[in-house]
Amino acid sequence: MSARILSGKDIAKEIRKELKEEIAELKDKHDVVPGLAVALVGEDPASQVYVGAKVKTCEKLGVNSIEERLPADTSEADLLALIDEWNEDPKVHGILVQLPLPKHIDEQKVLLAIRPDKDVDGFHPMNVGKMLIGEPDFLPCTPHGCQQILMRSGIETEGKHVVVVGRSNIVGKPVAAILVQKAKGANATVTICHTRTKDMASFTRQADILIAAAGVPKVIKADMIKEGCVVIDVGVHRIGKTESGKDKLCGDVDFDDVKEKASAITPVPGGVGPMTITMLMMNTVRSAKMRLDK
Ligand SMILES: NC(=O)c1ccc[n+]([C@@H]2O[C@H](COP(=O)([O-])OP(=O)(O)OC[C@H]3O[C@@H](n4cnc5c(N)ncnc54)[C@H](OP(=O)(O)O)[C@@H]3O)[C@@H](O)[C@H]2O)c1
């Protein structure tokens, strides 16, 4: 039997509709427009596409976007000064610095400079710590998107064995930290696999829910999962062009192979990808609301 397709695209649409209403209410009741400031240093083509998509989503939802495209030779001091300016600007509720940064800029120093209450990417150590102790202000966008797909598709995580393939700071570790919490949409038993894991398939085959975030195209095959597993594919890889000239994408999961054995699966594209920007918007709206309480 072929797996149920978990459309992140449809879930993202549903969340954006809810956010639009919240944004309208913020304007009507409090005269507040959530603002997101985005800095892009250099001309990395993928980063340009991501920043363009973020700005476009802001416009669609009624979030005020401030975009700063800086030359690749921008100094670390100049970038830090810009962040400082945004830290103090009351119209800015969220600050995002598109990664990766050019080599002469210390990424960690830049992330630390963003005020934690404006850190809508959730990468500041203060927010990572809050996530870990189960009192988050901002959850990192892609891992939060994975959780939302599960919750909004009615897939129970409580007591389930979730196996995460990948331990990066932006996907693998945080998605594991989110799903292990004593909380709604979590309460899972979590195993994390990585390149030093011995006999990885012996773990993935135990998964009720498998989250693939290895960054390796089609590394997860049908013989690595058990029958009826729910598969969330975070990977995105460009593997050529379609006939109409669009980028052809695949994930970390061999979709055609795995979909015959899984009970549910996210596609690539149209799965986790559309959720990431949506969760960024959710964090920006949350930041604007948190400010009201101060
Ligand atoms: N859809 C979205 O919005 C979105 C957002 C972020 C990332 N992504 C995609 O998600 C994927 C993962 O991203 P990332 O930033 O987490 O990647 P990353 O920083 O390269 O981390 C990959 C992780 O997977 C592990 N790994 C690599 N190959 C493996 C293998 N064969 N078996 C087991 N573990 C393996 C690595 O282990 P070690 O630690 O031992 O090296 C590492 O921990 C990428 O394809 C990326 O493009 C998508």
Image (cartoon, rainbow, N blue to C red):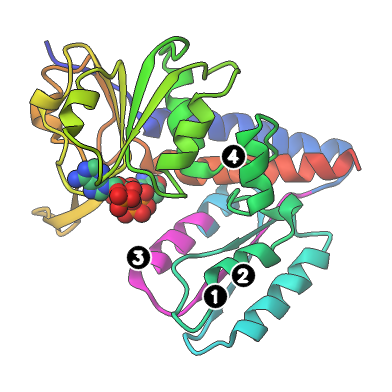
Looking at the picture, how far across and down is residue 258, in whole percent?
13, 26
Distance CA(mark 3)–CA(mark 1): 20 Å
Q: Give the foreground label among 1 and 4.
A: 1
Left or right of 183? Residue 199 is left
Give the residues drawn in magenta, as a range.
Answer: 33-54
For label 3, the crowd category at 10 Å Cα-Cα, with few meaning under 14, some 14 to 19 and many 20 or more, is: few
Can you identify the residue that label 4 sits on?
A: 139
For label 1, the crowd category at 10 Å Cα-Cα, with few meaning under 14, some 14 to 19 and many 20 or more, is: few
Can you identify the residue that label 2 sits on?
A: 110
Looking at the picture, how far across and down is residue 37, in whole percent?
65, 63
Looking at this view, name the residue that lies furthest to the right.
294
Say whether residue 47 is magenta. yes
Looking at the picture, how far across and down is residue 121, in whole percent?
58, 51
Looking at the picture, how far across and down is residue 14, in whole percent?
50, 27
| For marks 3 and 1 on the same chain, the one whose residue lies earlier in the sequence | 3
Looking at numbered disc 3 in the image, what kind of residue is underneath it? Ala
| For marks 3 and 2 on the same chain, the one whose residue lies earlier in the sequence | 3
Above or below, 294 against 237 in this view is above
Residue at disc 2, secondary structure: helix
Residue at disc 3, secondary structure: helix
Dot label at residue 46: 3
Distance CA(mark 3)–CA(mark 2): 20 Å
| For marks 2 and 4 on the same chain, the one whose residue lies earlier in the sequence | 2
Distance CA(mark 1)–CA(mark 2): 6 Å
